[in-house]
Amino acid sequence: MKPKVLNLEQEPEKERFFKMLVKQELINKIKDYFDLNVYETKVWLALIGKGSASAGEIAEISGVPRSRTYDVLETLEKKGFAIVKLGKPVKYLGVKPRMILEKLRNNVRTEAEERIQSLSNIKETEEFAQLEEIYKGGADPVKREDVSAAIKGRSNISNYLREIIREASKEVLICANARDILSKTKLFQQTFDVLKKADIKIKLCLSGEDNLIKKAENEFGIKVKKVDINAKFFIIDRSEILFYLSRPDSKEESAIWLNSDFFSEYFASLFELAFGKEKPEKPEKAEKSKEKN
């Protein structure tokens, strides 16, 4: 028996268009975006391309074996990607991509909120209290001043940065790119508000376009000094420094944290040179002001 040869000339216009449009590259992308397997992706694409179709029609359009199409359609229905249209024969409808995207977004949001709540509840448990005791009262606890560390990952660095800045007692010196700082406006706005309330000095040196530097100045309510230094570091109380190793446009962020008076003072002196100190009053003017008094 000769295999059936599909004649595109005999196919309806919609099906020809679908087969021309749906390439393997698209299937792979959609599969990853929506967390589907290959068969599920092909069947869903066939459904939204056809509009309404029986299992047999979907098998022919998608190229998924007919014996597997029923299982795949059932799975897609459970996941919310397909709807059963009652009648004889039974037909299926593909759910609109926008509706699927919104549904998945809501699912992720709900799961994230539940996870956050679950993590918050851990703080109140007896086991967490025991963890704190182990950390604080270990036989040979690690002293912070003895530690330097390499930190990788944008989220890890941001969390660590927030922690050490909020522990400042005197001053925080920041050298960075204006665009990069503005991309984390919420993080720095909240942190700067805490520092201002504690009357902690903040000095900010930024590189980049003038309009972005002005915007940062307005956003944070802090005087900004424009510099041409292609570096990003944070100095806390001239005793700790967090120095970024990666470029601002790098996908993978990495940084080094040093709890060292020597290095912190050295970079603080470079920072002050770039920031510029107020010029001392000239002796002649000082004498004249004394005479007036």
Image (cartoon, grey):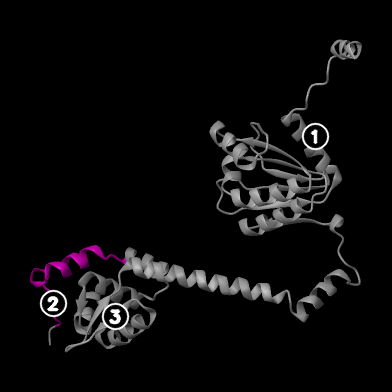
In whole angstroms, how far apart are the C-alphas of marks 3 and 2?
Answer: 31 Å
Choose between 172 and 20: the one closer to the eye.
172
Task: State which quadrant residue 121 falls in.
Answer: bottom right
Choose between 94 and 109: the one closer to the eye.
109
- Would residue 158 appear left or right of 111 to someone viewing this image? right
Task: State which quadrant residue 209 falls in.
Answer: top right
**Residue furthest left in the image:** 10
**Residue 162 drawn above or below residue 58:** above
- Would residue 257 appear left or right of 211 to someone viewing this image? right
**Residue 289 drawn above or below residue 146:** above
In whole angstroms, how far apart are the C-alphas of marks 1 and 2?
Answer: 79 Å
Residue bearing the label numbered 1: 269
Query: For residue 214, which numbered disc appears in the image?
Result: none
- Would residue 273 appear left or right of 186 to someone viewing this image? right
Residue 176 position within the rendered picture, expressed as x and y whole percent measured from the top left: 65, 41
The answer to whether the residues at label 3 and label 2 have Cβ atoms under 8 Å apart is no
Callout 2 secondary element: loop
Residue bearing the label numbered 2: 5
**Mark 1 or 2: the one toward you:** 1
Name the amino acid type tagged 2.
Val
Choose between 187 and 155: the one closer to the eye.
187
Residue bearing the label numbered 3: 83
Residue 61 position within the rendered picture, expressed as x and y whole percent measured from the top left: 21, 75
**Residue 154 drawn above or below residue 73:** above
- Would residue 18 appear left or right of 287 to someone viewing this image? left
Ranked by sequence position, the earlier of labels 1 and 2 is: 2
Q: Which segment did they paint magenta?
A: 3-24
Name the amino acid type tagged 1.
Ser
The C terminus: image quadrant: top right
In the rendered structure, does residue 47 fall within the stretch colored magenta?
Answer: no
Ranked by sequence position, the earlier of labels 1 and 3 is: 3
**Residue 42 drawn above or below residue 208:** below
